[in-house]
């Protein structure tokens, strides 16, 4: 029968160091107190044995787990990959551990929450917006702080960090008008996306304020394929615009490839294109897509600040981070 490798315990460390087991526990406890001589013995013995303290007993006793549940959307969207990296880096710099869950949409948040609560996480951060009152109420009932990106639902304990989507929509319209565009188009994201709706709101209202009420539009789902299909729809309906704003980069990239390769439309000569998220691909030579940067690093910092504030005040907060338009060749 094969021998099963046994992990070293605090008792093993105490025996090797010649101290009591409680001395080992105090050495690795934030609130524990031992002499420097004892600490040196314990640390040396732990290193020799490869011992690492078990955090579970402290968690079971009701102390903070130093663990944050991070919920993201489908990783095919590079925006979520950037959010995951930025938040993970920021949390780990503060000594927090990250428990990651990937779900398809806000409607699947409940399952992710239930799984996360089994580990007694200290907070939940969702890169997905909370879009239903039922989900907001479910998050509120957990009794722990929650921060969601681009959130529209208010509930006790549920805070949000938002990209300034509506202002960005207005800036996109102004940029295209400045370029000389007179006919405009918009590719929507999913109908239940608050961020996409806000981008459309800013875009359409600004154009209406300047006498443009007829805006060609088609719907996508934030994917490359849906952007390609939406572009085909717009141009085959005969409503090919001179200025096209897409609710995210993936749809804009799909639209650009279809316009150039399938329809023979020149960018930016025939149509100027703007996306949203400033993904890595937007800056590639093949695209040079104008796009809005959500400043994810700042959104991550604001998230940590909200969590820290909530621990002392128990008040929910809404923070809005400006988005920066990076004008590239696609709308030159």
Image (tube, rainbow, N blue to C red):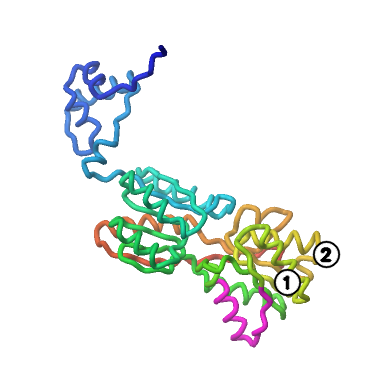
Q: Which of the 4 quarters of the picture holds residue 49?
A: top left
Is residue 152 shown above or below 142? below
Q: Nearer the viewer, residue 258 or 84?
A: 258
Q: Are marks 1 and 2 in contact (CB under 8 Å)?
A: no
Q: Residue at x 21, y 30 (%)?
A: 25
Q: Is residue 215 magenta-colored?
A: yes
Quadrant location of the C terminus in the rendered image: bottom right
What is the residue that sits farthest to the right in this orientation?
A: 264
The mark closer to the camera, 1 or 2, is 1
Q: Residue at x 55, y 50 (%)?
A: 75
What is the residue that sits farthest to the front in this orientation?
A: 1
Q: Describe residue 147's horizontal placement relative to residue 213 as left or right.
A: left
Is residue 56 shown above or below 296? above
Q: Earlier in the sequence, mark 1 or mark 2?
A: 1
Question: Label 2, on which residue?
Answer: 264
Q: Which of the 4 quarters of the picture holds residue 51?
A: top left
Q: Which mark is residue 234?
A: 1
Quadrant location of the N terminus in the rendered image: top left
Instruction: Give the SS element for disc 2.
Output: loop
Could you say where residue 114 lies in the image, as x and y percent from the top left? 37, 50
Q: Residue at x 47, y 60 (%)?
A: 106
Total tally of numbered discs in the picture: 2
Q: Residue at x 68, y 74 (%)?
A: 185
Could you say where residue 89 lies in the image, as x and y percent from the top left? 44, 46
Q: Is residue 112 magenta-colored?
A: no
What segment is highlighted magenta in the picture? Answer: 199-217
Q: Which mark is residue 211?
A: none
């Amino acid at each position: 029968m094969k021998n099963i490798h046994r992990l070293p315990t605090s008792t093993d460390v105490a025996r090797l160091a010649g101290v009591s087991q409680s001395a080992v526990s105090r050495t690795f406890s934030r609130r524990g107190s031992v002499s420097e001589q004892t600490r040196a013995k314990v640390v040396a013995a732990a290193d020799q044995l490869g011992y690492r303290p078990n955090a579970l007993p402290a968690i079971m006793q009701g102390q903070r787990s130093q663990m944050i549940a991070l919920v993201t959307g489908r990783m095919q969207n590079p925006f979520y990959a950037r959010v995951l990296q930025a938040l993970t880096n920021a949390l780990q710099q503060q000594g927090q551990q990250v428990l990651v869950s990937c779900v398809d949409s806000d409607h699947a948040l409940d399952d992710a929450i239930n799984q996360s609560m089994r580990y007694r996480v200290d907070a939940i951060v969702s890169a997905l917006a909370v879009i239903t009152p039922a989900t907001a109420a479910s998050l509120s009932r957990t009794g722990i702080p929650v921060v969601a990106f681009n959130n529209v639902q208010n509930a006790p304990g549920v805070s949000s960090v938002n990209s300034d989507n509506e202002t960005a929509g207005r800036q996109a319209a102004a940029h295209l008008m400045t370029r000389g565009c007179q006919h405009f188009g918009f590719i929507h994201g999913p109908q239940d996306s608050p961020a996409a709706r806000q981008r459309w709101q800013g875009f359409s209202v600004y154009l209406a304020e300047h006498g443009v009420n007829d805006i060609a539009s088609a719907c996508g789902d934030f994917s490359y394929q849906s952007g390609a299909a939406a572009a085909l729809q717009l141009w085959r309906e005969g409503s090919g615009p001179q200025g096209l704003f897409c609710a995210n980069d993936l749809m804009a990239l799909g639209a650009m490839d279809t316009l150039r390769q399938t329809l023979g439309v020149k960018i930016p000569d025939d149509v100027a294109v703007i996306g949203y998220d400033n993904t890595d691909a937007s800056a590639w030579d093949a695209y040079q897509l104008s796009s809005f940067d959500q400043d994810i690093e700042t959104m991550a910092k604001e998230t940590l600040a909200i969590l820290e504030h909530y621990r002392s005040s128990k008040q929910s907060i809404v923070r809005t981070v400006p988005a920066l338009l990076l004008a590239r060749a696609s709308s030159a």
